[in-house]
Image: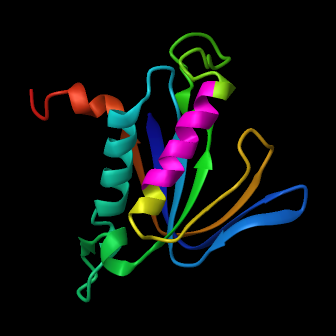
Amino acid sequence: MRALIQRVKRASVSVDGEVLGRIGPGLVVFVGIRRDDAQPQIAYVVDKTVNLRIFPDADGRFDLSAMDVGAELLVISQFTLCADTRRGRRPSFSSAAPPDVAASVFDCVLAAFRATGLTVRTGRFQAHMKVEILNDGPVTIALDSDDLSRPRRG
């Protein structure tokens, strides 16, 4: 599972002109679900996202997490995060989970984010969405659940 996290002042997602989700200060979380993603990957991405210290403290240092500041979350499914661009000029999405599998896993991702107690908004799975973001910083962090099996050093 891959996630791209952006700290925002505000953000919204709409489909066909209808706003489905809107947040104030918080995080936009784009989630790419791969074929083998399951509970360990969900737990890693959700825990890491809500506990990353990427909000400023009184001194302006990154020292507070989404949990600390009560951030709102706009969580969007985005299979293009699974793109493999190593060969050629057209990305391959062969590692992305098929839509029926991804929809089920994404529902679990949303449930896990909601279980944190933070406000969670979302778009519509597999729809062409318009996402408006007022990035704050900008602060953008990429997460990959494959990091679980990689050594920290070496």
Magenta residues span: 101-112
Q: Classify residue 46 as left or right of residue 18.
A: left
**Residue sticking out furthest to the right:** 16
Please name the colour scheme applied to the rendered image: rainbow
User: Please, is residue 33 above or below residue 64 in the view?
Assistant: above
Determine the image quadrant of residue 107.
top right
User: Please, is residue 97 above or below residue 123 in the view?
Assistant: above
Q: Nearer the viewer, residue 146 or 102?
A: 102
Please report the residue visible at 54 percent of the width from the left and 28 percent of the height from the top.
82
Q: Classify residue 129 as left or right of residue 1.
A: right
**Residue sticking out furthest to the bottom:** 58
Question: Does the magenta stretch mainly form a helix, a strand or a loop?
Answer: helix
- State which quarter of the image contains the C terminus: top left
- State which quarter of the image contains the N terminus: top left
Q: Indicate the position of residue 147 as horizontal and vertical percent values.
A: 27, 33
User: Please, is residue 123 above or below residue 42 in the view?
Assistant: below
Q: Indicate the position of residue 151 as horizontal and vertical percent values.
A: 14, 28
Determine the image quadrant of residue 118.
bottom left
Q: Indicate the position of residue 84 as horizontal and vertical percent values.
A: 53, 20
Residue 79 in sight here: no
Determine the image quadrant of residue 40.
top left
**Residue sticking out furthest to the left:** 154
Taking the magenta stretch, the answer to whether it contains residue 103 is: yes
Taking the magenta stretch, the answer to whether it contains residue 59 is: no
Please report the residue visible at 57 percent of the width from the left and 23 percent of the height from the top.
96
Q: Indicate the position of residue 110 as horizontal and vertical percent values.
A: 53, 52
